Image (cartoon, rainbow, N blue to C red):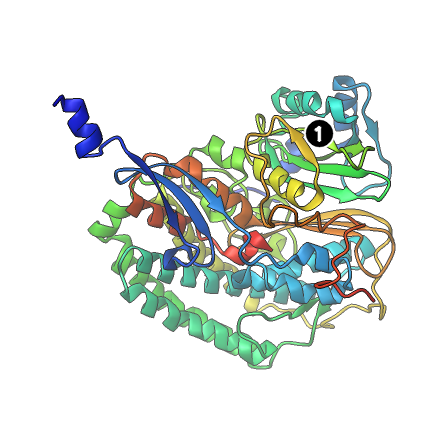
Amino acid sequence: MITKILTKNFYKTIMLNREELKEIIGSLEPDATFSEGTQLLEVTVPAEKLYALAEKLKSDSRTAFDYMINHTAVDFVKNFTVVYHLESTEKRHLVVLKSVLEDRDNAKVDSLTALYPAVEYFEREVFDLFGIHYNNHPYLKRFYLEDGAGFPLRKDYRDEVNIIER
Amino acid sequence: MSEEIIKDVILGENEEYIVNMGPQHPSTHGVLRLEVCLKGETVKYLIPHIGYIHRGIEKMTEALTYPQIIHLTDRMDYLSAHMNNEAVCLVVEDAMQIEVTERVKYIRTILDELNRLASHQLWWSAFGMDLGALTTFFYGLRDREYILDIFEESFGSRLLHSFVMPGGLMHDIHPNFQKRTKEFITYFRKKLPEYDQLLTGNVIFHNRSKGIGYMSKETAIGYGVTGPSGRGSGFSCDIRKIAPYGAYDKVQFNEILETEGDTFARYKVRMREMWESLNIIEQLIDNIPEGDYTAKMKPIIKLPAGEYFRRVETARGELGVYVVSDGNKSPYRMRFRTPNFSNLFVMNEISQGCKIADLIAISGSLDLVIPDIDR
Protein backbone atom coordinates (compact mmCIF):
# COMPACT_ATOMS: atom_id res chain seq x y z
CA MET A 1 0.00 0.00 0.00
CA ILE A 2 1.65 3.21 -1.11
CA THR A 3 0.33 6.71 -1.03
CA LYS A 4 1.86 9.30 -3.27
CA ILE A 5 1.75 12.83 -1.97
CA LEU A 6 2.66 15.40 -4.57
CA THR A 7 2.87 19.10 -4.18
CA LYS A 8 1.05 21.32 -6.61
CA ASN A 9 4.19 22.35 -8.44
CA PHE A 10 5.91 18.97 -8.51
CA TYR A 11 5.53 18.37 -12.23
CA LYS A 12 6.51 21.91 -13.15
CA THR A 13 10.06 21.18 -12.01
CA ILE A 14 10.67 18.25 -14.37
CA MET A 15 8.46 18.94 -17.36
CA LEU A 16 9.98 20.59 -20.41
CA ASN A 17 8.54 23.91 -21.40
CA ARG A 18 7.27 24.79 -24.82
CA GLU A 19 10.53 26.20 -26.21
CA GLU A 20 12.62 23.25 -25.04
CA LEU A 21 10.18 20.77 -26.55
CA LYS A 22 10.13 22.75 -29.78
CA GLU A 23 13.91 22.63 -30.01
CA ILE A 24 14.11 18.87 -29.37
CA ILE A 25 11.32 17.99 -31.81
CA GLY A 26 12.84 20.34 -34.40
CA SER A 27 16.15 18.51 -34.14
CA LEU A 28 14.46 15.08 -34.33
CA GLU A 29 12.44 15.97 -37.42
CA PRO A 30 13.61 18.93 -39.52
CA ASP A 31 10.41 18.90 -41.60
CA ALA A 32 8.20 19.58 -38.59
CA THR A 33 6.37 22.89 -38.46
CA PHE A 34 4.99 24.53 -35.33
CA SER A 35 1.84 26.61 -35.00
CA GLU A 36 1.91 29.85 -33.02
CA GLY A 37 -0.51 31.06 -30.41
CA THR A 38 -2.13 27.71 -29.62
CA GLN A 39 -3.16 26.32 -26.25
CA LEU A 40 -0.80 23.32 -26.47
CA LEU A 41 2.32 22.81 -28.55
CA GLU A 42 1.17 21.67 -31.99
CA VAL A 43 3.55 19.94 -34.37
CA THR A 44 2.62 19.29 -38.00
CA VAL A 45 4.57 16.68 -39.95
CA PRO A 46 4.08 15.13 -43.40
CA ALA A 47 2.04 11.90 -43.26
CA GLU A 48 4.91 9.67 -44.37
CA LYS A 49 7.16 10.92 -41.55
CA LEU A 50 4.55 10.58 -38.80
CA TYR A 51 5.49 7.08 -37.71
CA ALA A 52 9.21 7.84 -37.59
CA LEU A 53 8.69 10.94 -35.47
CA ALA A 54 6.31 9.18 -33.08
CA GLU A 55 8.85 6.39 -32.64
CA LYS A 56 11.60 8.91 -31.84
CA LEU A 57 9.37 10.85 -29.45
CA LYS A 58 8.58 7.67 -27.57
CA SER A 59 12.11 6.31 -27.33
CA ASP A 60 13.98 9.58 -26.73
CA SER A 61 14.61 9.87 -23.00
CA ARG A 62 14.30 13.68 -23.09
CA THR A 63 10.74 13.64 -24.40
CA ALA A 64 9.51 10.13 -23.35
CA PHE A 65 5.99 10.43 -24.77
CA ASP A 66 4.66 7.03 -23.78
CA TYR A 67 0.95 7.69 -23.29
CA MET A 68 -1.43 8.27 -26.18
CA ILE A 69 -4.31 10.25 -24.70
CA ASN A 70 -6.37 10.77 -27.77
CA HIS A 71 -6.37 10.32 -31.50
CA THR A 72 -8.94 11.69 -33.86
CA ALA A 73 -9.36 13.37 -37.22
CA VAL A 74 -10.92 16.61 -38.40
CA ASP A 75 -12.50 17.16 -41.79
CA PHE A 76 -11.47 20.58 -43.10
CA VAL A 77 -13.30 19.97 -46.43
CA LYS A 78 -10.06 20.66 -48.36
CA ASN A 79 -8.21 17.97 -46.43
CA PHE A 80 -8.31 15.63 -43.48
CA THR A 81 -6.13 16.35 -40.47
CA VAL A 82 -5.24 13.52 -38.12
CA VAL A 83 -4.56 14.65 -34.56
CA TYR A 84 -2.69 12.80 -31.83
CA HIS A 85 -2.47 13.99 -28.23
CA LEU A 86 0.60 12.55 -26.52
CA GLU A 87 1.68 12.81 -22.92
CA SER A 88 4.73 11.72 -21.01
CA THR A 89 3.71 9.88 -17.85
CA GLU A 90 7.10 10.56 -16.34
CA LYS A 91 7.50 14.25 -17.11
CA ARG A 92 3.88 15.20 -17.75
CA HIS A 93 4.36 17.40 -20.78
CA LEU A 94 1.88 17.32 -23.63
CA VAL A 95 2.26 17.62 -27.36
CA VAL A 96 -0.23 17.57 -30.23
CA LEU A 97 0.97 15.75 -33.33
CA LYS A 98 -0.80 16.58 -36.57
CA SER A 99 -0.63 15.46 -40.12
CA VAL A 100 -2.52 16.80 -43.11
CA LEU A 101 -3.90 14.30 -45.63
CA GLU A 102 -4.56 16.18 -48.87
CA ASP A 103 -6.11 13.34 -50.88
CA ARG A 104 -9.60 13.02 -49.41
CA ASP A 105 -10.78 10.14 -51.59
CA ASN A 106 -7.77 8.01 -50.86
CA ALA A 107 -6.67 9.18 -47.41
CA LYS A 108 -3.99 6.96 -45.93
CA VAL A 109 -1.68 7.23 -42.95
CA ASP A 110 0.61 4.80 -41.13
CA SER A 111 -0.89 3.07 -38.12
CA LEU A 112 0.85 3.74 -34.79
CA THR A 113 -0.49 0.53 -33.22
CA ALA A 114 2.97 -0.97 -32.89
CA LEU A 115 4.01 1.94 -30.66
CA TYR A 116 0.82 2.59 -28.71
CA PRO A 117 -1.65 -0.32 -28.35
CA ALA A 118 -4.38 2.14 -27.32
CA VAL A 119 -4.37 3.81 -30.71
CA GLU A 120 -5.59 0.65 -32.47
CA TYR A 121 -9.16 1.32 -31.40
CA PHE A 122 -9.00 5.07 -31.88
CA GLU A 123 -7.87 4.36 -35.42
CA ARG A 124 -10.70 1.92 -35.99
CA GLU A 125 -13.14 4.58 -34.83
CA VAL A 126 -11.63 7.15 -37.19
CA PHE A 127 -11.77 4.64 -40.05
CA ASP A 128 -15.41 3.99 -39.24
CA LEU A 129 -16.51 7.61 -39.05
CA PHE A 130 -14.14 9.32 -41.53
CA GLY A 131 -13.03 6.60 -43.93
CA ILE A 132 -9.33 7.21 -43.39
CA HIS A 133 -7.29 4.07 -44.03
CA TYR A 134 -4.37 3.02 -41.86
CA ASN A 135 -1.43 1.09 -43.24
CA ASN A 136 -0.35 -1.96 -41.21
CA HIS A 137 -3.40 -1.88 -38.96
CA PRO A 138 -4.07 -5.34 -37.46
CA TYR A 139 -7.87 -5.33 -37.62
CA LEU A 140 -9.34 -2.48 -39.64
CA LYS A 141 -13.08 -3.14 -39.66
CA ARG A 142 -16.21 -1.04 -39.17
CA PHE A 143 -16.78 -0.26 -35.53
CA TYR A 144 -20.12 1.37 -34.76
CA LEU A 145 -21.79 1.26 -38.14
CA GLU A 146 -22.45 -1.35 -40.77
CA ASP A 147 -20.63 -1.73 -44.06
CA GLY A 148 -21.91 0.70 -46.66
CA ALA A 149 -23.27 3.14 -44.10
CA GLY A 150 -21.07 5.99 -45.31
CA PHE A 151 -18.77 8.11 -43.17
CA PRO A 152 -20.94 10.38 -41.01
CA LEU A 153 -18.31 12.72 -39.59
CA ARG A 154 -17.30 13.90 -43.06
CA LYS A 155 -18.72 17.31 -43.72
CA ASP A 156 -20.25 16.23 -47.04
CA TYR A 157 -22.21 13.36 -45.48
CA ARG A 158 -25.94 13.56 -46.13
CA ASP A 159 -28.58 11.45 -44.43
CA GLU A 160 -32.02 12.59 -45.47
CA VAL A 161 -33.85 10.27 -43.08
CA ASN A 162 -32.12 10.80 -39.75
CA ILE A 163 -30.55 14.27 -39.98
CA ILE A 164 -32.80 17.30 -40.29
CA GLU A 165 -30.92 20.28 -41.70
CA ARG A 166 -32.01 23.74 -40.73
CA MET B 1 -7.56 -45.75 -30.46
CA SER B 2 -4.68 -43.52 -29.57
CA GLU B 3 -4.81 -41.26 -26.58
CA GLU B 4 -4.70 -38.16 -28.78
CA ILE B 5 -7.77 -39.16 -30.74
CA ILE B 6 -9.65 -39.77 -27.53
CA LYS B 7 -8.65 -36.34 -26.29
CA ASP B 8 -9.33 -34.61 -29.58
CA VAL B 9 -12.43 -36.24 -30.91
CA ILE B 10 -14.22 -37.94 -28.05
CA LEU B 11 -13.44 -35.63 -25.14
CA GLY B 12 -12.92 -32.60 -27.35
CA GLU B 13 -10.22 -31.18 -25.10
CA ASN B 14 -8.44 -29.24 -27.82
CA GLU B 15 -11.61 -27.94 -29.34
CA GLU B 16 -12.03 -24.19 -29.48
CA TYR B 17 -15.36 -22.59 -29.68
CA ILE B 18 -16.77 -19.09 -29.79
CA VAL B 19 -19.32 -17.88 -27.29
CA ASN B 20 -21.11 -14.56 -27.60
CA MET B 21 -21.42 -12.89 -24.22
CA GLY B 22 -24.05 -10.22 -24.54
CA PRO B 23 -25.41 -7.89 -25.82
CA GLN B 24 -28.10 -8.68 -23.27
CA HIS B 25 -25.93 -10.26 -20.60
CA PRO B 26 -26.65 -8.67 -17.20
CA SER B 27 -23.03 -8.57 -16.06
CA THR B 28 -21.86 -6.52 -19.01
CA HIS B 29 -23.84 -3.60 -17.48
CA GLY B 30 -25.23 -2.51 -20.81
CA VAL B 31 -25.33 -3.54 -24.41
CA LEU B 32 -21.84 -4.85 -24.99
CA ARG B 33 -21.09 -8.03 -26.92
CA LEU B 34 -17.93 -9.93 -26.14
CA GLU B 35 -16.96 -12.52 -28.72
CA VAL B 36 -15.08 -14.93 -26.48
CA CYS B 37 -12.95 -17.75 -27.88
CA LEU B 38 -12.87 -20.56 -25.34
CA LYS B 39 -10.89 -23.72 -24.94
CA GLY B 40 -12.80 -25.68 -22.40
CA GLU B 41 -13.52 -23.04 -19.82
CA THR B 42 -10.37 -21.01 -20.46
CA VAL B 43 -10.47 -17.78 -22.41
CA LYS B 44 -8.08 -17.75 -25.38
CA TYR B 45 -8.94 -14.29 -26.64
CA LEU B 46 -11.92 -12.02 -26.85
CA ILE B 47 -13.09 -9.35 -29.24
CA PRO B 48 -15.41 -6.64 -27.92
CA HIS B 49 -18.15 -5.56 -30.32
CA ILE B 50 -19.71 -2.21 -29.60
CA GLY B 51 -22.06 0.19 -31.32
CA TYR B 52 -25.42 -1.04 -30.07
CA ILE B 53 -26.27 2.36 -28.60
CA HIS B 54 -24.17 4.59 -30.80
CA ARG B 55 -26.07 7.86 -30.88
CA GLY B 56 -23.62 9.96 -32.85
CA ILE B 57 -23.11 12.55 -30.12
CA GLU B 58 -19.99 13.90 -31.85
CA LYS B 59 -21.98 14.53 -35.03
CA MET B 60 -24.87 16.07 -33.10
CA THR B 61 -22.59 18.59 -31.40
CA GLU B 62 -21.78 20.10 -34.79
CA ALA B 63 -25.35 21.39 -35.05
CA LEU B 64 -25.85 22.47 -31.42
CA THR B 65 -24.71 25.40 -29.31
CA TYR B 66 -22.40 24.94 -26.34
CA PRO B 67 -25.07 25.22 -23.61
CA GLN B 68 -27.07 22.59 -25.51
CA ILE B 69 -24.08 20.25 -25.73
CA ILE B 70 -23.91 20.16 -21.92
CA HIS B 71 -27.13 18.14 -21.93
CA LEU B 72 -25.69 15.59 -24.33
CA THR B 73 -22.61 14.95 -22.22
CA ASP B 74 -24.80 13.74 -19.37
CA ARG B 75 -25.79 10.84 -21.55
CA MET B 76 -22.27 9.57 -22.11
CA ASP B 77 -21.16 8.39 -18.70
CA TYR B 78 -24.44 8.83 -16.88
CA LEU B 79 -22.92 7.90 -13.52
CA SER B 80 -20.44 10.78 -13.63
CA ALA B 81 -22.77 13.23 -15.34
CA HIS B 82 -21.48 16.16 -13.35
CA MET B 83 -17.85 15.69 -14.34
CA ASN B 84 -18.81 15.35 -18.00
CA ASN B 85 -20.67 18.66 -17.83
CA GLU B 86 -17.73 20.29 -16.16
CA ALA B 87 -15.31 19.13 -18.87
CA VAL B 88 -17.24 21.00 -21.58
CA CYS B 89 -17.59 24.06 -19.35
CA LEU B 90 -13.85 24.15 -18.69
CA VAL B 91 -13.13 24.08 -22.42
CA VAL B 92 -15.53 26.95 -23.05
CA GLU B 93 -14.20 28.98 -20.12
CA ASP B 94 -10.62 28.33 -21.24
CA ALA B 95 -11.31 29.48 -24.77
CA MET B 96 -13.27 32.58 -23.78
CA GLN B 97 -10.88 33.32 -20.90
CA ILE B 98 -13.62 33.59 -18.32
CA GLU B 99 -12.63 33.43 -14.70
CA VAL B 100 -15.36 31.75 -12.66
CA THR B 101 -15.93 32.83 -9.08
CA GLU B 102 -14.46 30.98 -6.11
CA ARG B 103 -17.94 29.98 -5.01
CA VAL B 104 -18.53 28.19 -8.28
CA LYS B 105 -15.20 26.37 -8.06
CA TYR B 106 -15.96 25.13 -4.55
CA ILE B 107 -19.48 23.98 -5.37
CA ARG B 108 -18.31 22.24 -8.54
CA THR B 109 -15.62 20.36 -6.65
CA ILE B 110 -18.05 19.26 -3.93
CA LEU B 111 -20.49 18.05 -6.57
CA ASP B 112 -17.67 16.22 -8.39
CA GLU B 113 -16.84 14.30 -5.26
CA LEU B 114 -20.45 13.60 -4.33
CA ASN B 115 -20.97 12.26 -7.82
CA ARG B 116 -17.82 10.16 -7.56
CA LEU B 117 -19.10 8.72 -4.29
CA ALA B 118 -22.48 7.88 -5.80
CA SER B 119 -20.77 6.25 -8.76
CA HIS B 120 -18.40 4.20 -6.61
CA GLN B 121 -21.30 3.09 -4.40
CA LEU B 122 -23.17 1.80 -7.40
CA TRP B 123 -20.01 0.13 -8.68
CA TRP B 124 -19.49 -1.57 -5.34
CA SER B 125 -23.10 -2.78 -5.30
CA ALA B 126 -22.92 -4.14 -8.83
CA PHE B 127 -19.47 -5.64 -8.39
CA GLY B 128 -20.56 -7.64 -5.36
CA MET B 129 -23.65 -8.75 -7.23
CA ASP B 130 -21.58 -9.85 -10.23
CA LEU B 131 -19.66 -12.15 -7.91
CA GLY B 132 -22.79 -13.52 -6.29
CA ALA B 133 -23.05 -11.38 -3.15
CA LEU B 134 -26.53 -9.96 -3.54
CA THR B 135 -26.51 -8.09 -0.21
CA THR B 136 -24.04 -5.51 -1.50
CA PHE B 137 -26.67 -4.23 -3.88
CA PHE B 138 -29.01 -3.32 -1.04
CA TYR B 139 -26.27 -1.74 1.06
CA GLY B 140 -24.90 0.34 -1.81
CA LEU B 141 -28.22 1.58 -3.13
CA ARG B 142 -29.42 2.40 0.38
CA ASP B 143 -26.54 4.85 0.86
CA ARG B 144 -26.58 6.15 -2.72
CA GLU B 145 -30.16 7.25 -2.15
CA TYR B 146 -28.92 9.93 0.28
CA ILE B 147 -26.71 11.51 -2.38
CA LEU B 148 -29.39 11.32 -5.04
CA ASP B 149 -31.83 13.03 -2.68
CA ILE B 150 -29.36 15.88 -2.18
CA PHE B 151 -29.03 16.16 -5.96
CA GLU B 152 -32.77 16.08 -6.43
CA GLU B 153 -33.33 18.86 -3.93
CA SER B 154 -30.66 21.11 -5.41
CA PHE B 155 -30.99 20.53 -9.17
CA GLY B 156 -34.34 18.85 -9.62
CA SER B 157 -32.91 15.70 -11.13
CA ARG B 158 -31.25 12.65 -9.68
CA LEU B 159 -29.05 11.24 -12.41
CA LEU B 160 -28.69 13.57 -15.38
CA HIS B 161 -28.37 16.95 -13.73
CA SER B 162 -27.10 19.45 -16.28
CA PHE B 163 -26.36 21.79 -13.42
CA VAL B 164 -23.03 23.21 -14.51
CA MET B 165 -23.16 25.81 -17.25
CA PRO B 166 -20.35 27.66 -19.01
CA GLY B 167 -19.38 30.46 -16.65
CA GLY B 168 -20.84 28.99 -13.51
CA LEU B 169 -23.91 27.09 -12.42
CA MET B 170 -27.48 26.97 -13.64
CA HIS B 171 -28.74 28.44 -10.35
CA ASP B 172 -27.55 28.70 -6.78
CA ILE B 173 -27.48 25.69 -4.48
CA HIS B 174 -30.43 24.92 -2.24
CA PRO B 175 -30.22 26.41 1.30
CA ASN B 176 -30.33 22.88 2.72
CA PHE B 177 -27.44 21.67 0.59
CA GLN B 178 -24.64 22.21 3.12
CA LYS B 179 -26.62 20.83 6.03
CA ARG B 180 -27.69 17.70 4.21
CA THR B 181 -24.25 17.05 2.76
CA LYS B 182 -22.72 17.25 6.24
CA GLU B 183 -25.39 14.88 7.54
CA PHE B 184 -24.56 12.48 4.75
CA ILE B 185 -20.82 12.57 5.52
CA THR B 186 -21.41 11.73 9.18
CA TYR B 187 -23.80 8.97 8.14
CA PHE B 188 -21.56 7.49 5.47
CA ARG B 189 -18.44 7.54 7.65
CA LYS B 190 -20.28 5.06 9.87
CA LYS B 191 -21.57 2.98 6.99
CA LEU B 192 -18.39 2.67 4.94
CA PRO B 193 -16.72 0.25 7.41
CA GLU B 194 -19.76 -1.99 6.89
CA TYR B 195 -18.75 -2.31 3.26
CA ASP B 196 -15.37 -3.61 4.35
CA GLN B 197 -16.87 -6.02 6.83
CA LEU B 198 -19.22 -7.40 4.23
CA LEU B 199 -16.94 -7.83 1.23
CA THR B 200 -13.34 -6.70 1.62
CA GLY B 201 -12.35 -9.35 4.14
CA ASN B 202 -14.53 -12.09 2.70
CA VAL B 203 -12.54 -15.23 1.83
CA ILE B 204 -14.78 -16.20 -1.10
CA PHE B 205 -14.39 -12.71 -2.47
CA HIS B 206 -10.59 -12.91 -2.12
CA ASN B 207 -10.51 -16.19 -4.01
CA ARG B 208 -12.56 -14.66 -6.80
CA SER B 209 -10.54 -11.47 -7.12
CA LYS B 210 -6.93 -11.87 -6.01
CA GLY B 211 -4.49 -12.55 -8.84
CA ILE B 212 -7.26 -12.37 -11.43
CA GLY B 213 -6.87 -10.16 -14.50
CA TYR B 214 -3.34 -8.96 -13.86
CA MET B 215 -2.53 -5.70 -15.65
CA SER B 216 1.02 -4.41 -15.56
CA LYS B 217 1.84 -0.72 -15.41
CA GLU B 218 3.19 -0.84 -18.97
CA THR B 219 -0.06 -2.37 -20.24
CA ALA B 220 -2.07 0.28 -18.43
CA ILE B 221 -0.04 3.11 -19.96
CA GLY B 222 0.07 1.50 -23.41
CA TYR B 223 -3.67 0.95 -23.56
CA GLY B 224 -4.42 4.28 -21.90
CA VAL B 225 -6.25 2.70 -18.96
CA THR B 226 -6.92 5.56 -16.56
CA GLY B 227 -8.92 6.17 -13.44
CA PRO B 228 -9.10 3.69 -10.58
CA SER B 229 -8.46 0.82 -13.02
CA GLY B 230 -5.15 2.32 -14.08
CA ARG B 231 -4.21 3.39 -10.57
CA GLY B 232 -4.68 -0.20 -9.41
CA SER B 233 -1.66 -0.98 -11.58
CA GLY B 234 0.45 1.84 -10.20
CA PHE B 235 -0.13 4.19 -13.14
CA SER B 236 -0.27 7.66 -11.63
CA CYS B 237 -2.95 9.29 -13.77
CA ASP B 238 -5.07 11.44 -11.48
CA ILE B 239 -5.89 14.62 -13.41
CA ARG B 240 -6.95 16.22 -10.14
CA LYS B 241 -3.26 16.13 -9.15
CA ILE B 242 -1.59 16.54 -12.53
CA ALA B 243 -3.58 19.50 -13.80
CA PRO B 244 -5.80 20.73 -10.97
CA TYR B 245 -9.08 22.37 -11.89
CA GLY B 246 -11.86 23.73 -9.70
CA ALA B 247 -10.83 23.85 -6.06
CA TYR B 248 -8.62 20.74 -6.14
CA ASP B 249 -5.48 22.84 -5.67
CA LYS B 250 -6.89 24.17 -2.40
CA VAL B 251 -7.56 20.85 -0.69
CA GLN B 252 -5.27 18.23 0.77
CA PHE B 253 -5.85 14.78 -0.64
CA ASN B 254 -3.85 11.78 -1.72
CA GLU B 255 -3.73 10.11 -5.06
CA ILE B 256 -4.62 6.49 -4.35
CA LEU B 257 -2.19 4.02 -5.90
CA GLU B 258 -2.02 0.24 -5.60
CA THR B 259 0.65 -1.76 -7.35
CA GLU B 260 -0.70 -5.32 -7.45
CA GLY B 261 -2.57 -4.72 -10.71
CA ASP B 262 -5.18 -7.42 -10.17
CA THR B 263 -8.93 -7.22 -9.70
CA PHE B 264 -8.58 -6.88 -5.95
CA ALA B 265 -6.17 -3.94 -6.32
CA ARG B 266 -8.67 -2.09 -8.50
CA TYR B 267 -11.30 -2.83 -5.85
CA LYS B 268 -9.07 -1.44 -3.10
CA VAL B 269 -8.37 1.76 -5.05
CA ARG B 270 -12.07 2.53 -5.33
CA MET B 271 -12.75 1.72 -1.69
CA ARG B 272 -9.95 4.05 -0.58
CA GLU B 273 -11.09 6.72 -3.02
CA MET B 274 -14.43 6.86 -1.26
CA TRP B 275 -12.66 7.82 1.98
CA GLU B 276 -10.62 10.38 0.07
CA SER B 277 -13.77 11.89 -1.48
CA LEU B 278 -15.32 12.24 1.97
CA ASN B 279 -12.17 14.07 3.11
CA ILE B 280 -12.29 16.48 0.17
CA ILE B 281 -15.96 17.31 0.72
CA GLU B 282 -15.36 17.81 4.43
CA GLN B 283 -12.60 20.35 3.75
CA LEU B 284 -14.78 22.37 1.39
CA ILE B 285 -18.33 22.16 2.62
CA ASP B 286 -17.98 24.66 5.48
CA ASN B 287 -15.84 27.10 3.51
CA ILE B 288 -17.96 27.82 0.44
CA PRO B 289 -17.25 31.52 -0.15
CA GLU B 290 -20.00 34.01 -0.81
CA GLY B 291 -20.35 35.34 -4.32
CA ASP B 292 -22.17 35.03 -7.60
CA TYR B 293 -23.13 31.62 -8.83
CA THR B 294 -22.29 32.54 -12.40
CA ALA B 295 -19.96 34.89 -14.22
CA LYS B 296 -21.30 37.43 -16.67
CA MET B 297 -21.85 35.59 -19.94
CA LYS B 298 -22.90 36.78 -23.35
CA PRO B 299 -26.28 35.42 -24.44
CA ILE B 300 -24.72 33.60 -27.39
CA ILE B 301 -21.47 31.80 -26.67
CA LYS B 302 -19.00 31.85 -29.55
CA LEU B 303 -15.53 30.40 -29.09
CA PRO B 304 -12.66 32.19 -30.84
CA ALA B 305 -11.32 30.18 -33.78
CA GLY B 306 -8.74 27.65 -32.65
CA GLU B 307 -8.29 24.31 -30.97
CA TYR B 308 -8.81 23.56 -27.32
CA PHE B 309 -8.23 20.48 -25.20
CA ARG B 310 -9.14 20.01 -21.55
CA ARG B 311 -9.19 16.99 -19.31
CA VAL B 312 -11.05 16.15 -16.13
CA GLU B 313 -11.02 13.13 -13.85
CA THR B 314 -14.37 11.36 -13.91
CA ALA B 315 -15.26 8.43 -11.68
CA ARG B 316 -13.83 6.09 -14.32
CA GLY B 317 -10.80 7.93 -15.57
CA GLU B 318 -9.67 10.67 -17.82
CA LEU B 319 -12.24 12.48 -19.94
CA GLY B 320 -10.70 14.71 -22.59
CA VAL B 321 -12.67 17.20 -24.64
CA TYR B 322 -11.11 18.39 -27.88
CA VAL B 323 -12.82 21.25 -29.65
CA VAL B 324 -12.03 22.74 -33.04
CA SER B 325 -13.83 26.05 -33.37
CA ASP B 326 -14.22 28.23 -36.45
CA GLY B 327 -15.69 31.12 -34.50
CA ASN B 328 -19.33 30.10 -34.78
CA LYS B 329 -21.81 29.35 -32.04
CA SER B 330 -21.49 25.60 -32.56
CA PRO B 331 -18.19 23.72 -32.68
CA TYR B 332 -16.65 22.74 -36.01
CA ARG B 333 -15.61 19.43 -34.52
CA MET B 334 -15.93 18.15 -30.99
CA ARG B 335 -14.31 15.00 -29.79
CA PHE B 336 -14.75 13.25 -26.47
CA ARG B 337 -11.92 11.04 -25.31
CA THR B 338 -13.93 8.91 -22.95
CA PRO B 339 -12.30 6.82 -20.21
CA ASN B 340 -14.37 3.67 -20.70
CA PHE B 341 -13.41 3.42 -24.36
CA SER B 342 -9.78 2.75 -23.50
CA ASN B 343 -10.62 0.77 -20.38
CA LEU B 344 -12.71 -1.71 -22.37
CA PHE B 345 -10.13 -2.69 -24.95
CA VAL B 346 -7.53 -3.77 -22.43
CA MET B 347 -9.86 -6.68 -21.56
CA ASN B 348 -8.50 -8.89 -24.34
CA GLU B 349 -4.99 -8.42 -22.96
CA ILE B 350 -5.73 -9.06 -19.29
CA SER B 351 -8.30 -11.82 -19.52
CA GLN B 352 -6.33 -14.28 -21.67
CA GLY B 353 -5.85 -17.54 -19.83
CA CYS B 354 -8.43 -16.90 -17.14
CA LYS B 355 -11.68 -18.79 -16.66
CA ILE B 356 -14.96 -17.53 -18.07
CA ALA B 357 -16.31 -16.87 -14.57
CA ASP B 358 -13.31 -14.61 -13.92
CA LEU B 359 -14.24 -12.61 -17.00
CA ILE B 360 -17.25 -11.32 -15.05
CA ALA B 361 -14.99 -10.26 -12.19
CA ILE B 362 -12.60 -8.50 -14.58
CA SER B 363 -15.29 -6.59 -16.44
CA GLY B 364 -16.83 -5.67 -13.09
CA SER B 365 -13.54 -4.36 -11.76
CA LEU B 366 -13.01 -2.19 -14.85
CA ASP B 367 -16.37 -0.54 -14.03
CA LEU B 368 -17.58 -0.15 -17.59
CA VAL B 369 -20.44 2.13 -18.60
CA ILE B 370 -21.35 1.25 -22.16
CA PRO B 371 -23.02 4.51 -23.35
CA ASP B 372 -19.68 6.18 -22.62
CA ILE B 373 -17.95 3.82 -25.04
CA ASP B 374 -20.46 4.14 -27.86
CA ARG B 375 -21.25 7.83 -27.48
When asked about the image quadrant of residue A143, the answer is top right
Q: Residue at x 73, y 54 (%)?
A: B91
Callout 1: SS: strand
Q: Residue at x 55, y 52 (%)?
A: B51
Image position, residue A51 (x, y; %):
68, 24
Task: Reply above or below: A49 against B310.
Answer: above
Q: What is the chain identity of the residue bearing mark 1?
A: A
Task: Reply above or below: B374 against A79.
Answer: below
Image position, residue A54 (x, y; %):
67, 25
Q: Mark 1 sits on what residue?
A: A109
Q: Residue at x 45, y 37 (%)?
A: B234
**Outermost residue, left direction?**
B1
Task: Reply above or below: B166 against A134.
Answer: below
When asked about the image quadrant of residue A15, the answer is top right
Q: Is residue B156 left or right of residue A109?
A: left
Residue B76 visible to the viewer: yes
Q: Quadrant of the N terminus of chain B?
A: top left
Kind of residue sitting beneath label 1 = Val
Task: Reply above or below: B299 against B263.
Answer: below
In front: B270, or B56? B56
**Within 10 Å of the Cα at label 1, are there few (<14), some (14-19), or many (20+) other Cα atoms?**
many
Q: Quadrant of the C terminus of chain B?
A: bottom right
Q: Is residue B35 left or right of residue B264?
A: right
**Outermost residue, front direction?**
B1
Image position, residue B68 (x, y; %):
73, 67
